[in-house]
Image (tube, helix red, strand yellow):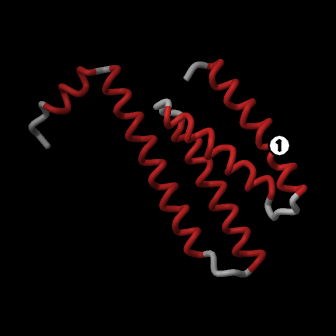
């Protein structure tokens, strides 16, 4: 993604998060800012995924970290049994980190195909 694309994406995320946060506050929701950020980032990451941008994984990682924080806060403040949600979002975090690493590795191999040839012909492994 270009620098201009990143700028538009970040500005859009900030504006939409603030707008949606105030809407959730009007509805008297809990953890409105974290919830707002996770929703806006999820939609943005989904759009980037449809356009096949590798940067989507950075947003998915952010969504997963914020969701872990959100569910940990719910577990601590409300005392419900939300431990399974923490496990699920942690698994999603591991998956998104793996996805980012894998997409980055494939991108580097496309830029430098000679590395792929070297790796595929290495008989010492």
**Tag 1: Cα neighbours inside 10 Å, few (<14), some, or many (≥20)?**
some
Secondary structure type for disc 1: helix
- Residue drawn at point x = 69 percent, y = 24 percent: 7
- Residue drawn at point x = 38 percent, y = 40 percent: 102
Q: Is residue 72 above or below residue 44?
A: below
x, y percentage for residue 78? 76, 77
Kindly give the residue lying farthest to the right in the view shown.
26
Q: Quadrant of the C terminus?
A: top left
Q: Looking at the rendering, which quadrant does residue 27 occupy?
A: bottom right
On the picture, is 94 further left or further right than 43?
Answer: left
- Residue drawn at point x = 79 percent, y = 61 percent: 31
Kindly give the residue lying farthest to the left in the view shown.
123
Q: Quadrant of the N terminus?
A: top right
Instruction: Give whichever of 79, 123 is nearer the camera.
Output: 79
| Number of disc labels | 1
- Residue drawn at point x = 18 percent, y = 27 percent: 118
x, y percentage for residue 12? 73, 32
On the picture, is 109 further left or further right than 91?
Answer: left
x, y percentage for residue 65? 62, 54
The residue that disc 1 covers is 18
x, y percentage for residue 35? 73, 55
Q: Is residue 40 above or below residue 67?
A: above
């Amino acid at each position: 993604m270009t620098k201009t694309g990143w700028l538009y994406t970040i500005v859009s995320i900030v504006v939409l998060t603030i707008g949606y946060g105030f809407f959730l506050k009007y509805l008297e929701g809990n953890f409105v800012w974290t919830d707002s950020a996770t929703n806006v980032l999820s939609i943005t990451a989904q759009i980037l995924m449809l356009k096949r941008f590798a940067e989507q994984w950075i947003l998915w990682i952010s969504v997963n970290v914020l969701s872990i924080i959100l569910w940990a806060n719910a577990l601590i403040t409300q005392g419900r049994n939300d431990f399974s949600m923490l496990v699920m979002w942690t698994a999603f975090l591991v998956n998104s980190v793996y996805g980012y690493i894998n997409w980055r590795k494939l991108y580097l191999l496309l830029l430098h195909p000679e590395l792929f040839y070297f790796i595929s012909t290495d008989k010492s492994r």
